[in-house]
Image (tube, grey):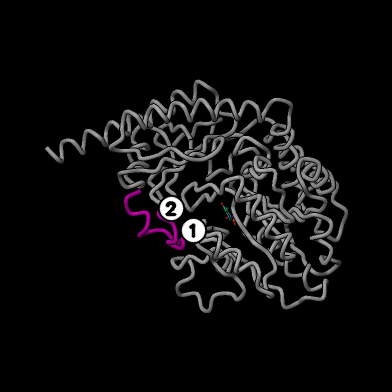
Amino acid sequence: MANATETSHLYQTYARNDIEVERGEGVWLVARDGRRFLDFSAGIAVNALGHAHPHLVEALKRQAETLWHVSNLFQVPGQEKLSARLCEASFADRVFFTNSGAEALECAIKTARRYHHVNGAPERFRILTFEGAFHGRTLATIAAGGQKKYLEGFGPKVEGFDQLPFGDHEALKAAAAQADVAAILVEPIQGEGGIRSVPAQCLRGLRELCDANGLLLIYDEVQTGVGRTGTFYAYEQSGAAPDLLASAKGLGGGFPLGACLATEEAAKGMTAGTHGTTYGGNPLAMAVGNAVLDVVLAEGFLEGVRERALQFKQALGGLLDRYPDIVEDVRGEGLLVGLKMRVANTDFVAAMRAEGILGVPAGDNVVRLLPPLVVTAEEIREGVRRIEAAAAALSFGQTRKSA
Ligand SMILES: *Cc1c(COP(=O)(O)O)cnc(C)c1O
């Protein structure tokens, strides 16, 4: 293991930890060496129903024995069913299926530009985004995110994306009034950026600004969607619906699946031949996506998520009181929780790992805690106990250092 990077043939693009995962059981991961971890990283908000959820396993097995792939030259009943359910559960009328979050965003960006094109305003192609945003790793989505560390060395930044400071209303108003702008793209809560929420009244303000200037509003709900924040999509809590929305991560529960959701009006330019994908909407992905919705949209499920979230937030509030030298703030919505740290977030994630619990570092020196949505009250208690043990270990270390 120690020499993995010397013997590996993989691109060395990831800072991997030393855990070799053998299997997953609900909210637990079991390593080859027998270590067991409470998984509050959940594949970065992907494993919404934990690991090896029996209903998902059954749906995937059944589909695997029936039909894997046919291409989008054929009718795919699973796509019809899943799109109808997503529209029923949201603002949308139309859905395009993809394999990932970045592809869902590419579809949303193309749809927004095409909308203005068919409206006779092809000069309207610029998309306004926000500093600290993360929208994926394709050439267009790194331009949309605008972060130097992801753009550097990859040639000219794709044209047509302008980053605005987070929370600067005047700059936003001025930018939105320009004649070449097509849309505003925003995460209701920045995930990679450090669990930074856009207040509900600001989302409503964005909606009004878009309407006043003839712009489309695009939400990136790749991380916040599918129950993660306690409602099916996070925007519901603001009452400000978008024209386009990118969804992925939790939508497939671990099977690669994304979707671009649109109103009929916003999608009107996306006629036959304008967009396509080989694997998007693949029958295996559709079977799993429909199975995820069976669980997440079942009566009372999201209410349960909100109850667990409240329990988690309150317990973490106690941790904040007891370890003000380690934790500065608890933020987020539902089970998308961020701990703003006073120690290095990567050190804290390592200390958590030593206590048998997994979290994910994010920007702004935050540790993300993303338990699967099926987490029980008892597992939340156990998780907080382990997080507190990590805080105690680091706090003790600090005291000794300064003594
Ligand atoms: C993960 C993520 C993406 C990119 O999704 P991929 O499936 O990795 O392409 C885009 N936006 C947000 C908010 C994300 O969290």
Q: Position of residue 2 (x, y in %)?
A: 32, 50
In this figure, which residue is indicated by the disc labeled 2? 363
Residue at disc 2, CB closer than 8 Å to ligand 1 = no
In this figure, which residue is indicated by the disc labeled 1? 132
Q: Residues within 10 Å of mark 1 (few under 14, many from 20)?
A: many
171 is higher (above) or lower (below) than 310: below
Q: How many marks?
A: 2
Q: Position of residue 69 (x, y in %)?
A: 77, 53
User: From which residue to which does the magenta span run?
Assistant: 1-15
Amino acid tagged 1: Gly
Rendering quarter of residue 181: bottom right
Amino acid tagged 2: Gly
Q: Residues within 10 Å of mark 2 (few under 14, many from 20)?
A: some
The residue that appears at 77% across and 44% down in the rendered structure is 86
Left or right: residue 144 versus residue 12 is: right
The residue that appears at 52% across and 49% down in the rendered structure is 191
Q: Residue furthest top?
A: 378
Q: Quadrant of ligand 1?
A: bottom right
Mark 1: secondary structure: loop
266 is higher (above) or lower (below) than 367: below
The residue that appears at 39% across and 36% down in the rendered structure is 33
